[in-house]
Amino acid sequence: MNIVSDMVVPARAPYSATLKKGQMMKIIDLESQQAVDALFYNAHDLSERYSVQDTLAAQATQGGKFYLETGSVLLSNEGNALVRIIADTCGFHDSCAGACSCESNSVRFGHETRFMHACRENFLTELSKYGLGKRDLVSNVNFFMNVPIRPNGELTVDDGVSKPGGYVELRAEMDVLVLISNCPQVNNPCNGFRPTPIRIIVSES
Amino acid sequence: MSLEPELSNLDRLTPEQYRARYEALQAKARARAAAPAALAAAGALPCVWKTETIPPGKYIVQRLKRFDVIRIRNPEGTPGAALFLWNADDVSERYNAGDTVKLQWTTVLTTGRVLFSDMGRVLAAIIADTGAGHDSIVGPNGPAQAKGAPNGRDNLRLGAAKFGMTRRDVGPAISLFSKITTDADGRFHYAGPPPKGAMVELRAEQNLLIALSNTPHALSPVQESSGAIEIEIGRQAPAADDLCRHFTEEAVRGFENTDQEFAR
């Protein structure tokens, strides 16, 4: 196992990296209950990107779940495999609730929250480095985020269950650009109301 | 709107205070969801200026002005109709599936609920609905499900192209007339095809571009459309006591974000 990069992403900060096919990314929730928002793009054609609906449709027709877990394959808007979840200590990861934004915070939590930092600010900052913008923001993966959809249709963000040092590990199924927002949200329980650092290790065998 | 400037300091409140705020909002959302949905009766649509029939497997694109009302009917109970929406004045603002379900604390989209853009504004309001169910989690089918038949993903992309856009511009969409439920084990279930005569009525709350495709839901066991989708487009501004504008406090704030852009 060869370590390609190993870094700590501060609380509330963005991160991005390009993985070559076969490389692995381990995302470690250092202090527990930290949501990690992620987006994935084909590194050679950035208009091919993660599609939650393709991913859940494929998963559901295989008797699967509305959340992501070990074995889940994250598909693109062309139905191609971007990354696979190969290890996980949390058990479930959301992909239905999207990323927080200043604008949606104003609706969800009150106009007084409009200028608080948000994941879509992080995503736009990272996207701009690759010549991308708001048109390229789609529904993302929320690692370690607990979003039940209850039988009555209720969708909430509940307390996270990931423990200190908990991790999820991905393997790139194509050359893939990975964008991360270490979620800054404090208005719901996704970060235990206290955003904390994460560690990201990229490796290859 | 009241501003509490101290909240713009990220760490000003304690975790306990943030939790109390969150749980108060959640309690109100649960009370709203528990109240019976108001299924508005479908009278004659005022000021109808266009009618159209979408044959099985086909799609339309349509430009709507704020307060145009589109009535979408499913006379034969075909298993789904794929829908995507953009703000006509800035197409980078478009339908956001995650925000639509998260901001309203529910995946159940019916009369009273609204469709949110990525900008915390309302694109369209569901002003009448017969309750067939509309799914924005799994959504329309694509080539993987349709296996050669016309499909929602490709048709919505073609619709985007008719407005000069590309696959970058089509995100997670809605499948109208598609009831999806989840069980306690976290699995999806497709609740069967919609009843014949299902109807939903949307009022444009901004100037919109829409693409609407007569193609099935991704989880429908029947992957070909089984009947026409009929649309009528009329025009009616909301009344002062408009249901959607007062349905939830989140909707109130979403409409505040929207209506002030049209106030001048």
Image (cartoon, coloured by chain):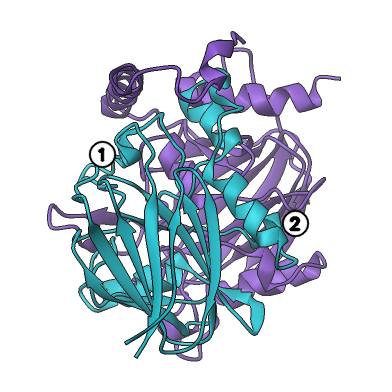
Q: Identify the amino acid type marked 1.
A: Asp
Callout 2 touching callout 1 (CB < 8 Å): no
Return the mark for residue A158.
1
Q: Residue at x 68, y 35 (%)?
A: B205
**Colour given to chain B in the rendered image:** purple
Q: Which chain is cyan?
A: A
Q: In the rendered view, would you say B65 is above or below B86?
A: above
Residue A104: image location, x then y, percent: 55, 35
Residue density around tag 1, few if under 14, some if 14–19, many if 20 or more, within 10 Å: some
Q: Chain of mark 1?
A: A
Residue B209: image location, x then y, percent: 74, 53
Label 2 sits on residue: B62
Residue A48: image location, x then y, percent: 60, 77
**Which quadrant of the figure contains the C terminus of chain B?**
top right
Task: Give the number of the mark in front: 2 or 1.
Answer: 1
* Residue A199 visible in this rendered orientation of the protein: yes
What element does badge 2 sit on? strand
